[in-house]
Image (cartoon, rainbow, N blue to C red):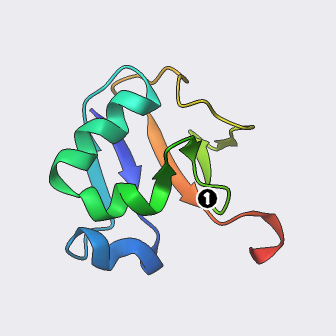
Amino acid sequence: MAVLHVPAPLRALCGGCDRIEAEGDTLRAVFASIGESHPELIDRILDDHGLRPTMAIAIDGSILEQSGLTEPVQADTEIYLVPPLGGG
């Protein structure tokens, strides 16, 4: 399963967990899976248009550019939520 690493400021939205395992073959599918158990967390990550402008995502160490959430993920993918450059 893919692993979403949750930064400290968002951990209260998922019961204090620092990582969440989820199934899915794309970022959208992984976030949909996480949204079933942690909808408040997903609301802080996504809006109606996709990734919120105040959020960035790194997969296996590479920051994604303007992700449409169609990025494929593997079972061992590590997904990180990162603040925008400049401290946002």
Q: Position of residue 7 (x, y in %)?
A: 47, 69
Which residue does the image show at 83% across and 72% down from the upper left? 86
Q: On the image, which quarter does residue 18 sit in?
A: bottom left
Horizontal placement of 63 versus 52: left or right? Answer: right
Which residue does the image show at 18% across and 46% down from the upper left? 36
Which residue does the image show at 46% across and 80% down from the upper left? 9
The vertical placement of 60 against 72, above or below, is: below
In the depicted view, which residue is nearer to us: 44 or 60? 44
Q: Quadrant of the C terminus?
A: bottom right
Q: Position of residue 35 (x, y in %)?
A: 26, 48
Q: On the image, which quarter does residue 50 sit in?
A: top right
Helix, strand or loop at disc 1? loop
What's under tag 1, amino acid-wise?
A: Met
Q: Residue furthest front?
A: 48
How many other residues sit within 10 Å of disc 1, few (<14), some (14-19) or many (≥20)? some
Q: Position of residue 15 (x, y in %)?
A: 19, 74
Q: How many marks?
A: 1
Q: Which residue is mark 1?
A: 55
Which residue does the image show at 24% across and 38% down from the upper left? 33
The vertical placement of 13 against 2, above or below, is: below
Horizontal placement of 61 versus 84: left or right? Answer: left
Q: Quadrant of the N terminus?
A: top left
